[in-house]
Image (cartoon, grey):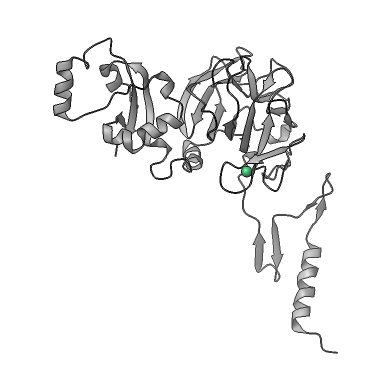
Amino acid sequence: MKIPIKTIIKIIFLFQIINTQIIIDDDDCFDIPKTLCTSKGKKIISTPNKNPNLIGHYTFDESGLKDSSGHKNHLNGYINYGPSYFIKGNSAFLSGNDMLTIKHNKDDYKGSDITISFWIYLLEDSTDNWRTIIHKGENIQQLTPTIMLWPKERRLHIRSSTEMFWNEGIESIGIINMKQWTLITVIFSGQMVQLYINGNLDNQKILKGKIIMNEGDFHIGKDPWHQGVKCYIDELKIYNTAIKSKVIEAEASILIPLIGSNYATLGCEKCTFLQALNSCPENYHMCSYPELYSGGYLIARRNGWFKFGTLVWARESQKEMEEKKEENEIGDPNVMKMCICCFDK
Ligand SMILES: [Ca+2]
């Protein structure tokens, strides 16, 4: 009897798959090892190499509560879906009463360093109460990490517990806009806490003590001790390390694809012209009017800087500067405006 060559190949391939180690995990799901060898090891089929420091990744797309990082830190709770931050897929709709949790898994942490990144779309303005977006901890005095909203404004309240005090952190300078997707990234590393809004460094601080990690669960959308936030959340990522600013900028580039999130940064909120000139960080300068209209104003609006007022200093031509001098606006210590700094080309 002749056996077709295709059938022989199929039998050999099946035999090799059977010979690989297939594990059935606690959730009764197949866990196939990352690499599969065929043709006596000449052909290697591998799954994409995932970032080992990404210990939780929640897309809320087809996978629902599933952790896509490969670490099996699946969400617990009931999920309602909302629209995705991008064209395809879903987000998680959180009503303000909904709470999702992630169990603490000590094997995933290398120390106290942690990065939290997510897209948020606020559906409700301030409610006069402190509201929890994310909180990890067994009780109200374990705070690493915690991201909340202030009672009377949409300002972020970033908290952690340190060796010096149980409650240390920073507040956002920008205000989170309503009904607009915003990328929030918070990095806790050593004694440093940094907040990025839409890929742009919003605030940072060296805390009094070293940050301490706790063994409590993550609470998403609200925690047992505070009210929650009515919002959509998408692409929630948890890293056990401090990620690089380039990674954050890359994720935020979807918002301002032509110029990038680092095109402009905030120099000062309300300052005189001379203070404004000195307020820009290295590699940045006070934006000119063309630069403001080419992206400076867009970034300022998206990152919530216009709460400081709508008056903005601009670097102008020599002639315009001379005219301004006559008006004495530049030297007047009572004229205060915002300074938006643009990247040096
Ligand atoms: Ca999604």
| Residue at the extreme top | 334
Above or below 272: residue 238 = below
280 or 16: nearer the eye? 280
In the rendered image, residue 116, in percent from the top left (x then y), is placed at 59, 32
Above or below 52: residue 135 = above
User: In the drawing, does residue 120 fall left or right of residue 285?
Assistant: right
The answer to whether residue 201 is seen in the rendering is: yes
162 or 275: nearer the eye? 275
Question: Could you tell me which quadrant the N terminus lies in?
Answer: bottom right
* Number of callouts: 0
User: In the drawing, does residue 331 fall left or right of residue 257?
Assistant: left
Residue drawn at point x = 43 percent, y = 20 percent: 307
User: In the drawing, does residue 82 fall left or right of residue 295?
Assistant: right
Residue drawn at point x = 72 percent, y = 43 percent: 64
The image quadrant where one finds ligand 1 is top right
Question: Could you tell me which quadrant the C terminus lies in?
Answer: top left
In the rendered image, residue 252, in percent from the top left (x then y), is placed at 49, 39
The answer to whether residue 282 is seen in the rendering is: no
127 or 290: nearer the eye? 127
Give the quadrant of residue 51.
top right
In the rendered image, residue 13, in percent from the top left (x then y), is placed at 75, 71
210 or 274: nearer the eye? 274
Give the quadrant of residue 242.
top right
User: In the drawing, does residue 62 fall left or right of residue 286?
Assistant: right
